[in-house]
Image (cartoon, helix red, strand yellow):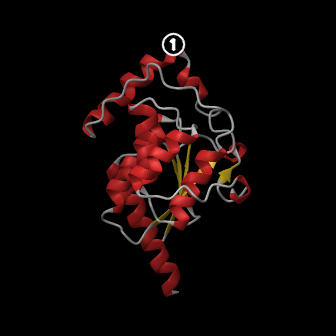
Amino acid sequence: MHIDFILDIQCLWSYLCWNHLQTVLKAFPHFEISPFFVSSPASIQKNFFIKEKMDLLEKSIKPFFNELKLEINLENLPVLQKDLSLIYQFVYHAFYKEKKYCILDHLFQSYFLLKKNIADLQVLKEIAKTCGSSFDFFDKAVLPDLPFRFKQETLHAVPCLIFEKKAVIFGAQSVSCLKNMLFLSNRLKQETTSR
Protein backbone atom coordinates (compact mmCIF):
# COMPACT_ATOMS: atom_id res chain seq x y z
CA MET A 1 0.00 0.00 0.00
CA HIS A 2 1.33 3.36 -1.01
CA ILE A 3 1.00 7.08 -0.20
CA ASP A 4 2.61 9.83 -2.24
CA PHE A 5 3.28 12.75 0.08
CA ILE A 6 3.80 15.99 -1.86
CA LEU A 7 5.24 18.70 0.33
CA ASP A 8 7.04 21.99 0.54
CA ILE A 9 9.88 21.89 3.05
CA GLN A 10 9.13 25.56 3.93
CA CYS A 11 5.42 24.91 4.54
CA LEU A 12 4.21 24.72 8.14
CA TRP A 13 1.13 22.76 7.04
CA SER A 14 3.40 20.16 5.42
CA TYR A 15 5.21 19.81 8.75
CA LEU A 16 1.90 19.31 10.57
CA CYS A 17 0.70 16.82 7.95
CA TRP A 18 3.92 14.81 8.31
CA ASN A 19 3.42 14.60 12.10
CA HIS A 20 -0.20 13.47 11.71
CA LEU A 21 0.73 10.97 9.04
CA GLN A 22 3.38 9.35 11.21
CA THR A 23 0.92 9.06 14.10
CA VAL A 24 -1.60 7.31 11.86
CA LEU A 25 0.90 4.95 10.22
CA LYS A 26 1.64 3.34 13.59
CA ALA A 27 -1.76 1.66 13.18
CA PHE A 28 -1.20 0.98 9.45
CA PRO A 29 2.42 -0.23 9.18
CA HIS A 30 1.86 -1.82 5.75
CA PHE A 31 1.60 1.62 4.09
CA GLU A 32 4.73 3.08 2.50
CA ILE A 33 5.35 6.78 1.91
CA SER A 34 7.08 8.35 -1.07
CA PRO A 35 7.94 12.01 -0.53
CA PHE A 36 7.77 14.40 -3.47
CA PHE A 37 8.69 18.08 -3.58
CA VAL A 38 7.02 20.70 -5.72
CA SER A 39 9.36 21.83 -8.48
CA SER A 40 9.61 25.34 -7.07
CA PRO A 41 9.30 24.75 -3.32
CA ALA A 42 8.80 28.33 -2.19
CA SER A 43 6.25 29.29 -4.83
CA ILE A 44 3.02 27.73 -3.58
CA GLN A 45 3.36 28.85 0.03
CA LYS A 46 5.33 32.06 -0.44
CA ASN A 47 2.36 34.30 0.42
CA PHE A 48 2.25 32.80 3.92
CA PHE A 49 5.65 34.25 4.64
CA ILE A 50 4.77 37.85 3.86
CA LYS A 51 5.11 39.68 7.19
CA GLU A 52 1.45 40.76 7.46
CA LYS A 53 0.24 37.17 7.08
CA MET A 54 2.67 35.56 9.52
CA ASP A 55 0.63 36.41 12.62
CA LEU A 56 -2.55 35.04 11.06
CA LEU A 57 -0.83 31.79 10.05
CA GLU A 58 0.75 31.38 13.47
CA LYS A 59 -2.58 31.93 15.27
CA SER A 60 -4.45 29.48 13.05
CA ILE A 61 -1.89 26.69 13.29
CA LYS A 62 -0.72 27.19 16.89
CA PRO A 63 -3.40 24.95 18.54
CA PHE A 64 -2.32 22.01 16.35
CA PHE A 65 1.32 22.43 17.28
CA ASN A 66 0.46 22.92 20.96
CA GLU A 67 -1.22 19.52 20.79
CA LEU A 68 2.08 18.08 19.49
CA LYS A 69 3.97 20.00 22.21
CA LEU A 70 5.94 21.99 19.63
CA GLU A 71 6.69 25.69 20.07
CA ILE A 72 6.30 27.48 16.74
CA ASN A 73 7.53 31.02 16.14
CA LEU A 74 7.70 32.20 12.53
CA GLU A 75 9.94 35.17 13.25
CA ASN A 76 13.39 35.15 11.66
CA LEU A 77 13.04 32.00 9.59
CA PRO A 78 16.04 31.61 7.28
CA VAL A 79 15.50 32.42 3.61
CA LEU A 80 16.38 29.30 1.66
CA GLN A 81 18.02 29.51 -1.72
CA LYS A 82 15.86 28.72 -4.74
CA ASP A 83 17.81 25.60 -5.72
CA LEU A 84 16.96 23.11 -3.01
CA SER A 85 18.21 20.07 -4.93
CA LEU A 86 20.68 19.25 -2.15
CA ILE A 87 17.77 18.81 0.29
CA TYR A 88 15.83 16.77 -2.28
CA GLN A 89 18.77 14.46 -2.85
CA PHE A 90 19.36 14.11 0.88
CA VAL A 91 15.75 13.05 1.52
CA TYR A 92 15.72 10.80 -1.55
CA HIS A 93 18.82 8.96 -0.38
CA ALA A 94 17.58 8.66 3.22
CA PHE A 95 14.13 7.36 2.23
CA TYR A 96 14.96 5.05 -0.65
CA LYS A 97 18.46 3.86 0.10
CA GLU A 98 18.68 3.84 3.88
CA LYS A 99 15.01 3.78 5.02
CA LYS A 100 15.71 6.65 7.43
CA TYR A 101 12.31 8.30 7.59
CA CYS A 102 13.33 10.52 10.53
CA ILE A 103 15.16 12.77 8.04
CA LEU A 104 11.97 14.76 7.35
CA ASP A 105 11.40 15.22 11.11
CA HIS A 106 14.87 16.67 11.52
CA LEU A 107 14.63 18.89 8.44
CA PHE A 108 11.33 20.39 9.57
CA GLN A 109 12.52 20.82 13.16
CA SER A 110 15.84 22.35 12.11
CA TYR A 111 14.07 24.87 9.91
CA PHE A 112 10.97 25.80 11.94
CA LEU A 113 12.15 25.25 15.52
CA LEU A 114 15.92 25.80 15.41
CA LYS A 115 15.77 28.31 12.51
CA LYS A 116 18.71 26.76 10.68
CA ASN A 117 19.43 27.16 6.99
CA ILE A 118 18.67 23.61 5.89
CA ALA A 119 19.90 24.35 2.36
CA ASP A 120 23.42 24.61 3.81
CA LEU A 121 25.65 21.55 3.34
CA GLN A 122 27.04 21.69 6.89
CA VAL A 123 23.54 21.78 8.41
CA LEU A 124 22.53 18.76 6.30
CA LYS A 125 25.65 16.91 7.44
CA GLU A 126 24.68 17.57 11.09
CA ILE A 127 21.18 16.20 10.42
CA ALA A 128 22.64 13.15 8.66
CA LYS A 129 24.89 12.45 11.65
CA THR A 130 21.96 12.80 14.09
CA CYS A 131 19.88 10.33 12.05
CA GLY A 132 22.73 7.88 11.52
CA SER A 133 22.64 8.52 7.79
CA SER A 134 25.67 8.69 5.53
CA PHE A 135 26.49 11.76 3.52
CA ASP A 136 29.16 10.19 1.30
CA PHE A 137 26.65 9.66 -1.50
CA PHE A 138 26.45 13.34 -2.42
CA ASP A 139 26.78 13.85 -6.13
CA LYS A 140 24.34 16.15 -7.96
CA ALA A 141 24.28 13.78 -10.93
CA VAL A 142 22.45 11.22 -8.76
CA LEU A 143 19.42 13.46 -8.21
CA PRO A 144 16.56 12.15 -10.36
CA ASP A 145 14.31 14.65 -12.10
CA LEU A 146 11.38 12.31 -11.57
CA PRO A 147 9.67 11.03 -9.55
CA PHE A 148 11.17 13.07 -6.74
CA ARG A 149 10.13 16.49 -7.98
CA PHE A 150 6.52 17.21 -8.74
CA LYS A 151 5.36 19.83 -11.22
CA GLN A 152 3.51 22.50 -9.29
CA GLU A 153 1.06 23.13 -12.15
CA THR A 154 -0.67 19.87 -11.27
CA LEU A 155 -1.24 20.89 -7.64
CA HIS A 156 -3.89 23.01 -5.96
CA ALA A 157 -2.04 23.19 -2.65
CA VAL A 158 0.51 21.46 -0.48
CA PRO A 159 0.61 19.24 1.41
CA CYS A 160 -1.08 16.76 -0.88
CA LEU A 161 -1.57 13.07 -0.16
CA ILE A 162 -2.30 10.57 -2.93
CA PHE A 163 -3.49 7.17 -1.73
CA GLU A 164 -2.73 4.25 -4.05
CA LYS A 165 -2.89 6.64 -7.05
CA LYS A 166 -6.69 6.69 -6.59
CA ALA A 167 -7.70 9.14 -3.87
CA VAL A 168 -6.28 12.61 -3.22
CA ILE A 169 -6.61 14.94 -0.24
CA PHE A 170 -5.03 18.36 0.31
CA GLY A 171 -4.01 20.09 3.50
CA ALA A 172 -2.93 19.00 6.96
CA GLN A 173 -5.90 16.77 7.71
CA SER A 174 -6.70 15.53 11.20
CA VAL A 175 -5.46 12.19 12.48
CA SER A 176 -9.01 10.77 12.35
CA CYS A 177 -9.46 11.89 8.73
CA LEU A 178 -6.16 10.27 7.73
CA LYS A 179 -7.11 7.05 9.54
CA ASN A 180 -10.37 6.95 7.59
CA MET A 181 -8.54 7.51 4.30
CA LEU A 182 -6.06 4.73 5.04
CA PHE A 183 -8.85 2.38 6.07
CA LEU A 184 -10.79 3.23 2.90
CA SER A 185 -7.72 2.78 0.68
CA ASN A 186 -7.07 -0.57 2.29
CA ARG A 187 -10.67 -1.71 1.70
CA LEU A 188 -10.63 -0.58 -1.92
CA LYS A 189 -7.36 -2.42 -2.51
CA GLN A 190 -8.78 -5.63 -0.98
CA GLU A 191 -11.98 -5.39 -3.06
CA THR A 192 -10.02 -4.80 -6.27
CA THR A 193 -7.73 -7.74 -5.51
CA SER A 194 -10.58 -10.13 -4.69
CA ARG A 195 -12.36 -9.55 -8.02
Residue 155 left/right relative to 98: right
Is 145 placed above or below 114 here? below
> How many labels were placed on the picture?
1
Residue 149 left/right relative to 33: right
Image quadrant in which you'd find residue 152: top right
Q: Position of residue 184 (x, y in %)?
A: 42, 65
User: In front: 187, or 40?
Assistant: 40
The extreme bottom residue here reads: 195
| Residue lying at 37% horizontally and 47% vertically, measured from the top left | 19
Image quadrant in which you'd find residue 45: top right
Is 52 placed above or below 22 here? above
The extreme top residue here reads: 52
Residue 76 visible within the image: yes
Residue 89 left/right relative to 111: right
Is 156 placed above or below 43 here? below
Q: Position of residue 85 (x, y in %)?
A: 66, 46
User: In front: 79, or 62?
Assistant: 79
Mark 1 Cα-neighbour bin, 10 Å: few <14, some 14–19, many ≥20: few
Q: Position of residue 159 (x, y in %)?
A: 52, 44
Image quadrant in which you'd find residue 186: bottom left
User: In front: 147, or 24?
Assistant: 147
> Label 1 sits on what residue type?
Glu
Q: Position of residue 69 (x, y in %)?
A: 25, 37
| Residue lying at 40% horizontally and 39% vertically, measured from the top left | 109
Mark 1 — residue? 52
| Residue lying at 41% horizontally and 47% vertically, measured from the top left | 105
Is 117 placed above or below 153 here? above
Residue 172 visible within the image: no
| Residue lying at 51% horizontally and 13% vertically, measured from the top left | 52
